[in-house]
Image: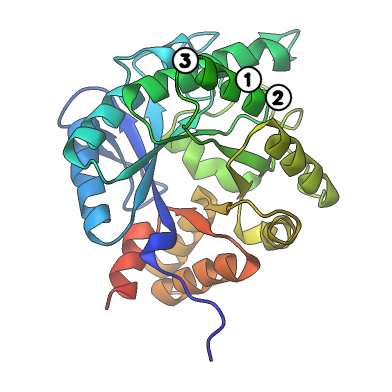
Amino acid sequence: MRETAISPDNFVYPLFVTNGSGVRLPISSMPGCFQESADNAVKNAREAFSLGIPAVILFGIPEYKDETGSAACKETEAVQTAVKALKDALPELYVITDVCMCEYTSHGHCGVIRNGDVDNDATLELLAKEALSHARAGADMVAPSDMMDGRVGAIREALDQHGFSALPIMSYAAKYASAFYGPFRQAADSTPQFGDRLSYQMDPANRREALREVALDIEEGADVVMVKPALAYLDIISDVRNAFDLPVAAYNVSGEYAMVKAAAQLGWIDGDRVMLEMLTAMRRAGADLILTYFAKDAAKILQQ
């Protein structure tokens, strides 16, 4: 009689990749997650794949940062190196790359700064170059998370012009300026050095705006649309699912993960049951894909 089912096949497992070899640094606010070099990312992904998780998404910790995030496009940087290593070791694993500038800029914002704020149009060219470098490394899908207006179209045009017309784009289409991102910003070293991201991410109070944002990204060529965060935005996931026919992804973000892990460690909740209840709620709301740090934990339980 159960109406909603979840499976490891619904999960995308996020990995934080860095340069070097033999690196595996625990992320204190996200127990069970690590900053890891490509060799260890392969080991982590191999375990995930063996549990039935079909896909990973990569976030990079670069060798250096500057005002324009130039390391984002380097073919020898962490994400590009990890993509190649993962596709060589696990050809059937689906490798998605996050496309954004915040991990690569010295100021921690998602684009070029002009007059104290992000210059939307000047950032589009950088995002297109970053996505193209990921495609050349062998990524199966690129996922722009910056929330610049027009970035899906700019990336689609760049990919098409360079022979990657079949490479799909998963757009962070409705991404809110949320307080749930704190642990991720520690993990990716991407905390803004000034101000906030309210000028380009969505106001958490807005519901109808999400449909406008999603519609614009679909018009520009998005193949999958995402709502981020997930738990406090189940109504948005449901709205998007009901309004559009494309696959819908939900990002079960770092703050949602960290709260469950912390409360479980203190014995205040049954962590496994809460985890599965949250993931089921995201599926029930309409998410086809769930990006979640719980992926391996949940998959182990679901396989029992």
What's the residue type where badge 1 is placed? Answer: Ala
Q: Residue furthest bottom?
A: 1
Q: CA distance from mark 3 to mark 1?
A: 13 Å
Residue wearing tag 3: 162
The residue closer to the viewer here, 261 or 150, is 150
Residue wearing tag 2: 150
User: Is disc 1 in contact with disc 2, using a CB cutoff of under 8 Å?
Assistant: yes
The residue closer to the viewer here, 117 or 304, is 304
| Colour scheme employed for the rendering of this structure | rainbow
User: Is disc 3 in contact with disc 1, using a CB cutoff of under 8 Å?
Assistant: no
- What label does residue 249 carry, if any? none
The residue closer to the viewer here, 240 or 255, is 240
The residue lying at 60 percent from left, 56 percent from top is 230
Query: Which of the marked residues, 3 or 1, is nearer the chain's N terminus?
Result: 1
What's the residue type where badge 2 is placed? Answer: Gly
- Neighbor class of circle 3 (other Cα within 10 Å; few <14, some 14-19, many 20+) is few
Describe the element under mark 1 as helix, strand or loop: helix
The residue lying at 67 percent from left, 10 percent from top is 122
Residue wearing tag 1: 154
Q: CA distance from mark 2 to mark 3?
A: 19 Å
What's the residue type where badge 3 is placed? Answer: His
Query: Which of the marked residues, 2 or 3, is nearer the chain's N terminus?
Result: 2
The vertical placement of 145 against 194, above or below, is below
Describe the element under mark 3 as helix, strand or loop: loop
The residue lying at 60 percent from left, 71 percent from top is 284
